[in-house]
Image: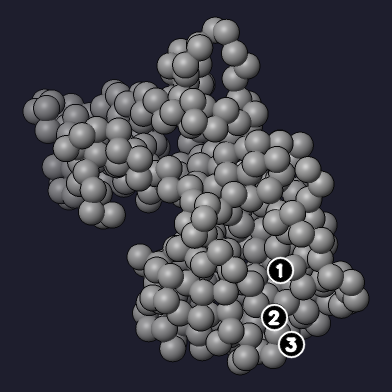
Amino acid sequence: MRTSADGTGRRPADGAVRAATVGIDIGGTSVRASVVDASGQVIDTTQAPTPHSARALEDGLEHAVRELGGRHRIGAVGLAVAGFITDDRTTVRFAPHLPWVDAPVAHDLGKRLGLPVLLEHDANAAMWAEHRFGSAAGGHNAVMLAIGTGIGAALLVDGVLYRGSHGVAPELGHIQVVPDGRACPCGKRGCWERYCSGTALAETAIELLAADPSRSTILAREEFRDPGSLTGRRVAAAAQDGDRIAQRAMAEFARWLGIGLAMVGDIYDPDLVVIAGGVSTSAPLFLDEARENYAGLVTGAGHRPLARIRTTQLGEAAAMIGAAELARAAYSVA
């Protein structure tokens, strides 16, 4: 299937505008906006804390674009949002860490700026950036797992971003893997991301520490001094330093990643999986073991090709780059 540069299968309209595009990654704690050129290079960036009200957030987005617009000619804006987006990519249905519910953000912000605005789920935007410029280049059917606080996911089918019938697919992090397991903020129990995420890594370490009263490790002493202070990043650092509890927690993380990758393989049969998100920076501690678990658990193990598994090439900039590239193509900005 021949696709357009926006991953939709549609060809962009003629009459390209000679201007740059801005990609904005709207996270729960910060808003990062970048001017991105046609080769996927970030050429200018601004960042600010994420406001807590809808009006203040839209004010902040306007300010960021106008700041960048003072230094560059801007033709369109792409927003990467951690939430449910309508299939026409104009409205945020719901975003758990942002103050938007059924909000026509593209229309409202576009009216403020006098520019076309496109919305995209942040994992989809990151997937598109990796496909166009990074680790997923050349991938035909690819999956991205953005593993951080939870698991964000994106799916590329025949080179086209798959969004489902209502614009909310795929929510792989909320597939139930343990009936009546750990409680998840989504309202269910036993979701995959409750066992395979930065948050889950810390929770696993705390459970292991509770079962080991010796307090003979670095993590045990830290948790004793400041209960509840452990983070996934700290557990990974301790594992790197040889802490046995942290290493056990990391092995458990790798086991669950392999289990989930096998499910993904059974359902989608991708040729490529990209691991992104904050946890990806610790890949040397878990990825080889996760690959082995995946290879042994996928249906038909030993008798089928396996997906290549890579880490992100574009890192934290991927969602901004992808949002900018999608806006560039949708609005024929050259």
Quarter of the rendering containing residue 155: top right
Amino acid type indicated by mark 2 = Pro
Q: Quadrant of the C terminus?
A: bottom right
Q: Position of residue 77 (x, y in %)?
A: 67, 75
The answer to whether the residues at label 2 and label 1 have Cβ atoms under 8 Å apart is: yes
Q: Write the residue at 59% across / 68% down.
A: 88
The answer to whether the residues at label 1 and label 3 have Cβ atoms under 8 Å apart is: no
Q: Write the residue at 77% across / 73% down.
A: 331
Amino acid type indicated by mark 1 = Ala
Q: Element type at marker 1?
A: helix
Q: Write the residue at 76% across / 80% down.
A: 74
**Colour convention of the picture:** one colour
Q: Residues within 10 Å of mark 1 (few under 14, many from 20)?
A: many
Q: Element type at marker 3?
A: loop
> Mark 3 to mark 2: distance in Å?
17 Å
Q: Position of residue 72 (x, y in %)?
A: 79, 80
Q: Quadrant of the N terminus?
A: top right
Q: Would residue 10 be visible to someone looking at this image?
A: yes
Query: Which residue does the numbered mark 3 point to in the structure image?
Result: 70
Amino acid type indicated by mark 3 = Gly
Q: Position of residue 149 (x, y in %)?
A: 37, 50
Q: Tag count in the figure? A: 3
Instruction: Using residue 236 as the reference point, say whether residue 183 is left or right of it.
Output: left
Farthest residue, direction front: 165
Query: Which residue does the numbered mark 2 point to in the structure image?
Result: 116
> Mark 1 to mark 3: distance in Å?
20 Å
Is residue 195 or residue 314 the one in the foreground? 195
Of badges 3 and 2, nearer the viewer stands 2
Q: Which mark is residue 327?
A: 1
> Mark 2 to mark 1: distance in Å?
8 Å
Q: Element type at marker 2?
A: loop
